[in-house]
Image (tube, grey):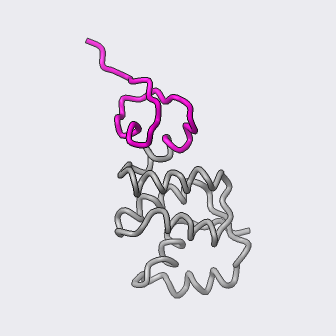
Amino acid sequence: MPVVDTDFLVALFREDDGLGEHAEELYREHEGNLVAPPYVLLELLFVSIDYSMDPERVVANALELVECSHDEGLLLKAAHFVKEMEMTPLDAVVAAFSDGRRVISSDSALDRAGVERIELKRRG
C-alpha cells in the first residue's frame, strides 16, 4: 500500500499543477490502496491556505481518496477551525484534539474554537 506525500494530493486538487496529469495516472493505478499519515494531511491544511483553497473541502476530498492512519474526524474538525475560526493549522489540531478537555496554553486563538484554556502566563 503506497504512502502518499502532500505534493501528490496537491497535484490532484490544483488544475494548474504540473504534476497533476501524472498524479491522476498514479491515483488510478493505486486507487483504493493509498494511505496518508496524519502529518501529510496537516501539511495539506497549510498548503490550502497558501493556495487559497477551502481547507474543509481539501481535507474531506483527501480523505475520500486515501486512507488515513489517524482519526479522520479530528482532521475534519481541525479543517473547520482553520476555515471558520481563522486558526493556524497547528492551533486547529490542538483545539480539535482537546475534545472538551482543557488546554494549557498562552494562545488565545484556542478561545475562538470554544476551548477551555488554562492560561499560561509570563512570570515576573
Residue occupying the far left of the picture = 124
Residue nearest the observer in this picture, 105 or 4: 105
Determine the residue positioned at 56% across, 66% down.
Answer: 60
Residue 52: horizontal and vertical position, in percent? 35, 68
- In the rendered view, would you say 65 is above or below 40? below
Q: Quadrant of residue 22?
A: bottom right
Q: Is residue 43 left or right of residue 67?
A: left
Q: How many marks?
A: 0
Determine the residue positioned at 50% across, 51% down.
Answer: 78
- Quadrant where the image shows the N terminus: bottom right
In reply to whether residue 114 is colored magenta, the answer given is: yes
Residue 25: horizontal and vertical position, in percent? 61, 86
Determine the residue positioned at 55% across, 37% down.
Answer: 98
Residue 43: horizontal and vertical position, in percent? 47, 58
Please provide the residue range marked out in magenta: 95-124
- In the rendered view, would you say 113 is above or below 6? above
Determine the residue positioned at 50% across, 68% down.
Answer: 57
Q: Is residue 85 left or right of residue 30?
A: left
Residue 75: horizontal and vertical position, in percent? 56, 54
Q: Is residue 97 left or right of residue 89?
A: right
- In the rendered view, would you say 24 is above or below 78? below
- In the rendered view, would you say 59 is above or below 42? below
- Quadrant where the image shows the C terminus: top left
Residue occupying the far front of the picture = 114
In reply to whether residue 44 is colored magenta, the answer given is: no
